[in-house]
Image: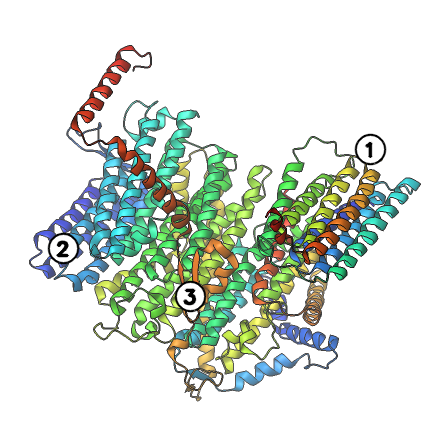
Amino acid sequence: MTLGPLLSLLLVLAVAPVLPGIATRTRAFLTGRRGAPVLQLYRDLAKLLRKNVIYSRTTTPVFRLGPIVSLVSILVAATLLPLDGHTALFGFSGDLVAFTGLLGLGRFALVLAGLDTGSSFEGMGASREVTVSAFAEPALLLGLTVLVLATGELSLAGMLGEQLAAAWARTLPSLVLAAAALFMVALAETSRVPVDDPATHLELTMIHEVIILDHSGPELAMILYGQALKLALFGVLVVSAVVPRALLPSGMAALALLGGLVLIAAAVGVVESSMARLRLNRVPQFLVAAGALAVFAVILLLR
Amino acid sequence: MTVLLWAVGLILAGGGGVLLLRRAPRLGERLYGALLVGGGVVGLWPTLAVLRGGPTLRVTLPGSLPGGAWVFGVDPLSAWFLLAVLGVGACAGVFGLGYLAPERGHRPVAAAHALFALLLVALVGVVTAQAMVPFLAAWEVMALSAYLLIMFESEQAAVRRAGFIYIVLTHLSTLALVAMFAALSVHAEGQSFAALAAGNQTPGAVRTLGLVLALAGFGLKAGVVPLHFWLPGAHAAAPSHVSAVLSGVMLKMGIYGLLRVLSLLGAPPPWFGWTLFGLGLGSGVLGVLWALGQHDLKRLLAYHSVENIGIILLGLGVGLLGLAYGQPLVAVLGLTGALLHTLNHALFKSLLFLGAGAVLRATGTRVIDQLGGLGRALPWTALAFGVGSVAIVGLPPLNGFLSEWVIFRGLFVAGGSREVIRFAVMGAAGLGLIGALALACFAKVAGVVFLGNPRSPADASLSPGDPPPNMLAPMLVLAGVCAGIGLMPSLILGPARMVAVSIAPAIDGGAVSAEWGGAAARISAFGLGLVALVGLVLLLRRSLRQGRVAQVAATWGCAMAVPTPRMQYTASSYAAPLLAAFGPLAGIRRHREATAFHSHPVDPVQDVVVVPVWHELERVSLRLRRIQGGRVRWYILSLIFTLLSLLFYLTNSRFAP
Amino acid sequence: MSGLHELLLLCVVLTNFWVLGTTRLSSTIRATAIQGALLAGLPIALHPGWSLHTVGLAAGTFAVKALLLPAFLSWAIREAAVRREIEPLIGFSASMVLGAVAVALSFGIAQRIPLQESNSSLLIPVALATVMVGLLVLTTRNKALTQVVGYLLLENGIYVFGLSQAERVPFLVELGVLLDIFVGIFIMGIVVFHINRAFDSLDSTRLSELKD
């Protein structure tokens, strides 16, 4: 365990809440409004940590455990990525399966916590969330398959680190397509337009927001922070696929990562302001299109 | 080997004992339970010895039995499957004692226990048989005792129908197996497996026929789509502890058979590997898709068995492709993944079926949409079922993640090669889809059954509480083993690799072993770290809450004044968007009237293919009935005609043997 | 310049996916126009000298495929007042999946066709893929105008194939573009106006009423 990956991890953990703020600010700017301050999520998290919590009578310990498991799974997933461009804090061969498995674990915990409240809204949200994730998972795996085939490595540290820099020039078209597919999956996983609108107030149109309706206080803070961190992690995936950060020295690589994350957040904001939310039965088509792009990228590498 | 025979003897004695002592059921059942557990533990001793690298065991039964010498033995492949048979069998048998106890007066409970013991012994026989005839004999005893156990509640029409479909199809599979053995013994000098192996090493038409028949017979038994449609009915109709053994162990006999045939015949041609790969992918996706739409808890779990058999075949197919294309690492990974998933599925599927049995005893219904909120009444059952759910979805840190990780690695390593096998990497997306659909399904089951509020008024005659210890202990033991394997994978990764190498000696196991050790330790650290981190955050959260009391209020209802439990999402509505996205493939029939809506799941293979074909056959057969005139002299004339033709054939034809 | 034609061919495949995935007719026409522009740039990317022949071909292709035909199709949409595509025979998701399968198949088949790869190893696969996607759109879509778009995709695929064989058969590609103009206008003129006049709608599922 060197100091480089640990520092990069702490940096990303500290910076993650800025990204949803940037996305919201960009969206507001492009639609002619001022929007909330970029650092708003930090203030929200601090406020929520101070607040007391209300539990529903219907709930069991599953409800209290859900946000914790969700946050921990995303934290552990963050340790698997090579955030400094070279090495990850922890990894093993085939840990990309662990990455998708951890995302699934977090989702499972939140869905169960939602069903625990016995509310029809959370049930609806749970149903939609698993529908979206059922189509997002193959697309995510296909995008990661492109990275595996391009580098010949099975661990995330290898796939996004030095070997990718070596194979970058040769496989650039596939990497760009894979990054586009991963960006679309990121929009689905972090519940952004066109899959889910984070700014909507109508429960019947929400997917992710409605599962967490009954959470409050520190648990809600954990969930919001986990969402921001998930956006950061997908941003790391997209940025690392397109920019060979391993060629830069460690400090420059971290700066490049931060710059890339800001750009990704701004891109999310641009997409949110230019597209309308898709009808719910069109969301699988959106994700199948992402999968088709990734399949095309895989075919280019397999021939 | 004699130790294993002692174990078998103990189990048989238990079965006999409970039958003899059926006037004193409590004593008989206690004796049965003790002998069953004792037999299981005693039998595990030589099994673990073989898996740790000990010599293979062998015994030949004395006396002259039909079909040559009856040879039984335990080699690494048998030992691996014996683990599942003995472990799951003992747990399910003990569970069955408590499960069937309320039925003592009005159903043949003692006979059911005795038949269960017979089923276990037959399973041991299938797995340890080393010659054709004892294998087929044990296979038939297994199939028949399972049939009798399925028909335990035969006064219900649905149970009778399920039993009928099961017995017809299992005999189809036996027929295919008999034909397969006939084909394989054309070139062989004898009845034992060693003789079959020696005679069938060179590729040829007979060997190909043998492979196809093996796929048909063992695939049918394993429940591969499209030969799976007997599974849901049979596994739902049987008593829950029997369903656990049917799903957890008997399906694996199909996988065992395929592996045994492959170990006898050597590396198969590439088309066999691609066929298994495709069948595995199809079974996996379709199995979990059809599971999503089920209203009945046990039918849902049965369809999930189809899905997991698909995953096992996927791993097996990739492994065979590795053998066919000369990629030893892919071969080891694929075969090991398939073997691991076999054991893991036996563990968590039986756990889930036992949990479903506990739910059935506590509430009296299997319909998911009528259940709810059982987590408060049955906390330990809910915990065990939750562990089983996390394991079957393949989430870290439990054992399902381990076997899926190995299979994924096999697919990705295959993608890196220069041969045709690299197209198998697309299976990774399919495996991901299967996993995501399984997550959807088990979040639904666990959430709707155990969480929330009860969706129908509780049946006052039943006691909604945790089941008695003899039902709870097996569930907790199985849950503990799932967690143990997930957190300490080095326990079984080594033995699984050894079994894989024993099936296909062409693989060089040494190249892979170095890689295993490091990865296994890291996965242990990963799993334990995950659990420790959850505990840490939990403690931090507690300390954050010092001095503050959490408020309790009703679930937020968005201005609905009186929310009722009936307003909760049902399992059918939960699954509806996902099933609608797949269209007619999902097999949901919807009926809409002016004031009502009704949906029910059908098995597309059964309803679209099998039943119409069956009716067509019936129609044609009715027309053929005109041949039967009813007069005796026509029957005798046809007998004479057949005899004369046979005599002519035997004496004159140059094809005479 | 050597990477330019590969980039153009990759973008051609992406426009194929665009046509498969979109529900708006104006979007499919825009995709066809962009594909036409890409194809116009292909001869210049493949033969780097700026000869009169190459420039003329590129300009003519651009004029026909990227300007003329899309404009004509847009005019037809306005005349017939149709906006969206209704759900096709097999669903949009399944179309996308089949399109990906078609691309995979064409890459696999292209390796086995014994043709001399003089220019680029992507020309034949992309040609086959575009032809297959065009056939897919032709057979599974309901609106006659989308079927015309599918036919145009088919023609584009044949054009790319012709480019790969241009050294052996002179003027093959030019003849292809002329055929494009001819058949395109022919089909659109007769089919669109006659169907619209005779049946008051452009829904080709209702064409089966002809058999009564």
* Residue, far front: C212
Q: Is residue A151 visible?
A: no
Residue at screen point 24% across, 54% down: B90
Mark 2: secondary structure: helix
Choose mark 3 or mark 2, whichever is in front: 3
The answer for how far apart the CA atoms under marks 3 and 2 are is: 38 Å
* Residue, far right: C52
Say what amino acid the circle numbered 3 marks: Ser
Say what amino acid the circle numbered 2 marks: Ala
Host chain of mark 3? B
Front position in the image: B276 or C19: C19
Mark 1: secondary structure: loop
The answer for how far apart the CA atoms under marks 3 and 1 are is: 62 Å
Query: Would you place residue B312 above or below residue B210 in this image?
Result: below
At label 2, counting other C-alpha atoms closer than 10 Å, the crowd grade (few under 14, some 14-19, many 20 or more) is many
Question: At which x and y percent is residue A299?
Answer: 64, 45
